[in-house]
Image (tube, rainbow, N blue to C red):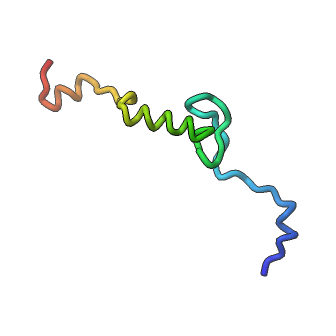
Amino acid sequence: MTDTSKMTGAKVEPLRKARPCPECGKPSVRDHYPFCSDRCRTLDLSRWLNGSYAIPVADDEAKADGEER
C-alpha cells in the first residue's frame, strides 16, 4: 500500500489552465470547463442549437459548388 501521508503536502497541478468563461468572463471551473457554470454552458449550447453560430462561406467556395448568385 502507498503511504498517503507523503502525498498530503504535494501540490496538485490542474489538468487545464484556468481560462475566462466565453459567456461572461468569470474564471472557468473544472466541472463546467471552459465555462464557469452550468448556466453559461447551457446558454452556449442553446446558441449552437438555434443556429446563432455559423461558419461564413467565401464566394470562391460557393462558385466551386456550382451555385450562382
Q: Is residue 15 left or right of residue 12?
A: left
- The residue positioned 39% from the left and 28% from the top of the image is 52
Query: Residue 60 sits in which quadrant?
Result: top left
Return the x and y of residue 41 as percentages of the image width and height: 53, 39
Q: How many marks?
A: 0
Out of 16 and 43, give the one closest to the viewer: 43
Q: Is residue 50 left or right of residue 64?
A: right
Is 30 placed above or below 63 here? Answer: below
Query: Residue 57 sits in which quadrant?
Result: top left
- The residue positioned 57% from the left and 41% from the top of the image is 38
Return the x and y of residue 37 as percentages of the image width and height: 61, 39
- The residue positioned 87% from the left and 70% from the top of the image is 5
Is 31 placed above or below 24 here? Answer: below
Out of 4 and 13, give the one closest to the viewer: 4
The residue lying furthest to the bottom in this view is 1
Return the x and y of residue 46 as percentages of the image width and height: 43, 35
Is 32 placed above or below 58 here? Answer: below
Q: Is residue 11 left or right of residue 50?
A: right
- The residue positioned 35% from the left and 31% from the top of the image is 51
Query: Residue 49 sits in which quadrant?
Result: top left
The residue lying furthest to the top in this view is 69
Q: Quadrant of the N terminus?
A: bottom right
Q: Is residue 31 left or right of residue 3?
A: left
Q: Quadrant of the C terminus?
A: top left
